[in-house]
DNA sequence: CGGAATCCTAAAGGATACTG
DNA sequence: CAGTATCCTTTAGGATTCCG
């Protein structure tokens, strides 16, 4: 029997750095975009609307570093670079898709809550 | 038949603001802490290690505004304030718990990926 | 105890220009 | 096309002090 020794609620636990990466809106949107299959940089950029090039690059690098996304460069001109979820990254596809669905399914409720809150404040 | 009109991938869609709230490490940890039942401010503070008082207050306010958490003040001295998940907030308990479990379950793999990435860089 | 208020630093994020 | 590099603005977050 192996004991569970990781705990995100412990401030020094390494698992918290991993939670910080995946519990992030840009990560969520990029993983969602890649859930249907590999995409090149430009297509992720078009799919995840409003993200700046810098943030997209930074986030993809971080995801690659964590083994969630892999990057493949084709020796073509103009260059073509494809990103895809790794096996590890695919295990995030469903959980983050659930968050996306939650946000879309409950937005009316959330908007009403905000309105009510702002009225009482 | 109702059409789904919300899409977090659209930059102006209100649902994105909701995703930004729930796809957040502090939100995740606070909701996880409250999953076992109501807690007072101080106990959340102790459970979610390393969070500052300001950030805890700010995040709780935002969650209350979004209808995810409710706040109850007891007329006592010293004051006692309890926070608990609303019915809406409880629907987040499992999804965010999954993210937590993911972070803890895959941290070795992530750490190895980081090491490998840093070596090739 | 549970905050609010203030001040400050660090990190996230954006705009632009440039390059292989 | 897919970046880098640079500079800049904005937001997140932390430390401290004070208050009912």
Image (cartoon, coloured by chain):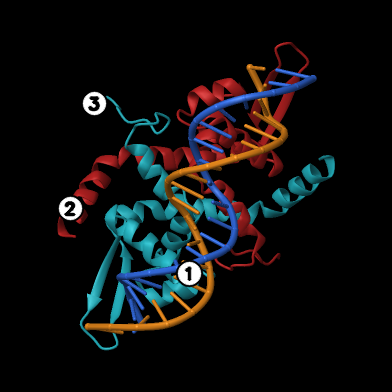
Chain colours: A cyan, B red, C orange, D blue
| Quadrant in the picture for residue D19 | top right
Image position, residue A19 (x, y; %): 40, 43
Q: Earlier in the sequence, mark 1 or mark 3?
A: 3
Task: Check contact, mark 1 vs mark 3: CB within 8 A.
Answer: no
Q: Label 3 lies in what chain?
A: A
Q: Is residue B95 visible?
A: no
Q: Label 1 lies in what chain?
A: A
| Quadrant in the picture for residue B3 | bottom right
Q: CA distance from mark 2 to mark 1?
A: 28 Å
Name the residue: 66% across, 66% down. Answer: B5
Residue carrying label 3: A2
Image position, residue B30 (x, y; %): 54, 34
Q: Quadrant of the C terminus of chain B?
A: bottom left
Image height check: is B46 above or below B102? above
Name the residue: 80% across, 44% down. Answer: A116
Which numbered disc covers residue B116?
Answer: 2
């Amino acid at each position: 029997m192996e004991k569970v020794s990781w705990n995100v609620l412990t401030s020094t636990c390494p698992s918290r750095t991993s939670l910080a990466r995946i519990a992030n809106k840009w990560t969520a949107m990029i993983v969602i975009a890649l859930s249907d299959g590999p995409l090149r940089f430009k297509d992720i950029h078009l799919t995840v609307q409003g993200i700046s090039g810098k943030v997209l690059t930074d986030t993809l690098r971080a995801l690659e570093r964590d083994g969630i996304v892999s990057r493949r460069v084709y020796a073509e001109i103009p260059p073509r670079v494809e990103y895809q979820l790794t096996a590890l990254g695919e295990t995030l596809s469903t959980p983050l898709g659930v968050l996306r669905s939650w946000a879309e399914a409950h937005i009316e409720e959330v908007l009403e809550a905000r309105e009510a809150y702002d009225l009482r404040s």
